[in-house]
Amino acid sequence: MNESAPAGLAVVREVPALRAAVAAWRRQGARIAFVPTMGNLHAGHFALVEEARRQADRVVASIFVNPTQFGPSEDFQRYPRTPEQDAQGLARVGCDLLFLPDVETLYPLGVERSVRIVVPDLADVLCGAHRPGHFAGVATVVARLFNLVQPDVAVFGRKDLQQLQLIRHLVADLAFPVRILGVPTRREADGLALSSRNQYLDAEQRQRAPALYRALRGLLTEVRAGVAVGRAERAAAEALAAQGFEVDYVAVRRESALHSPVVAFEQQPDLVALGAARLGTTRLIDNVALAELED
């Protein structure tokens, strides 16, 4: 245990200490929830921990900036790392244990020699088409963390809906005895989804950033009104480009089948609009479900 940890929060860095803590809780009959993160925590992350607290007797969070989900030109080295501040926040929202491993702990044979997990269909579409290998890195590290923590429930944010669905696929296919719970996206007052990467935006970019959320809401509204899906997607992308975004994609999908394009609007309760675009060097992602149009 880390002696400098905030009151009420145990901080462990090694696997034996993590397993000993979890085993002790299991002997007491405790139900365990898990919230994996990459740190630099904000209100969206803390909402996940609060939900985990409602779901279980004990809550474990992890902070690990996973090298296998970053591409060669992406921001692994500059990704913000604030573990002391994060630990204070986790203690305030009722987290019991913070697992803070280094790369060697999660990849004991080395990153280059590590076993990789690839989830078919979901790994190479939408964000996966623009970030080759990203979702293999996500699936690999989540599987490792599930194996170490062995939670009853794991809590993820819906902001990265593709990641959430990929993890659900992983759990179902590999028979992890873990319930996966998705929590609605936390937003700023102007609609911008909370993200650790928002701090990279300069003042002018921050003013423009909520346009992605508005574009996705508009896209779904147009499709629901009968506009052809492809036409509405192109119009949304063009509108974002006109506002200075470099658009990776905007798309309408069914949440349960993100790999399959939607041709025309149908009364499907899981219809969702998703998008990813850059402002300067900052990549923003977001999604809006059909049910949210009533909000």
Image (cartoon, grey):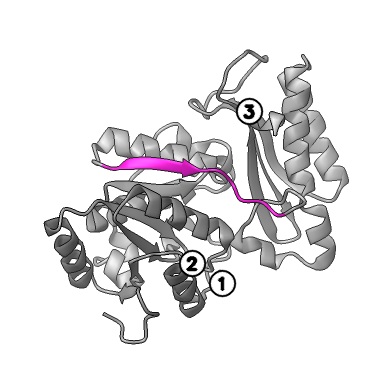
Q: Residue 137: x, y in percent?
A: 41, 52
Quarter where residue 212 is shown: top right
Distance in Å between CA atoms under marks 1 and 3:
33 Å
Q: Which residue does the numbered mark 2 point to in the structure image?
A: 39
- Front in this rendered view, residue 121 or 37: 37
Q: Earlier in the sequence, mark 1 or mark 3?
A: 1
- Front in this rendered view, residue 7 or 270: 7
Q: Which residue does the numbered mark 1 point to in the structure image?
A: 80
Q: Do tag 1 and tag 3 residues touch (Cβ < 8 Å)? A: no
The crowding category of the residue bearing disc 1, from other C-alpha atoms within 10 Å (few below 14, some 14 to 19, many at least 20), is some
- In the rendered structure, the answer to whether residue 20 lies left or right of residue 242 reads left
Q: Which residue does the numbered mark 3 point to in the structure image?
A: 291
Distance in Å between CA atoms under marks 3 and 2:
30 Å
- In the rendered structure, the answer to whether residue 97 lies left or right of residue 191 reads left
Q: Residue 103: x, y in percent?
A: 35, 70
| Residue type, numbered disc 2 | Gly
Question: How many callouts does the rendering have?
Answer: 3
Q: Could you tell me which residue is drawn at 41 percent across and 66 percent down? A: 64
Q: Is residue 184 magenta?
A: yes
| Secondary element at image label 2 | loop
Distance in Å between CA atoms under marks 1 and 2:
8 Å
Q: Residue 38: x, y in percent?
A: 47, 63
Q: Could you tell me which residue is drawn at 36 percent across and 47 percent down? A: 55
Q: Is residue 234 above or below residue 80?
A: above
- State whether residue 289 appears in this view: yes
| Residue type, numbered disc 1 | Pro
For the record, the magenta segment spans 178-188
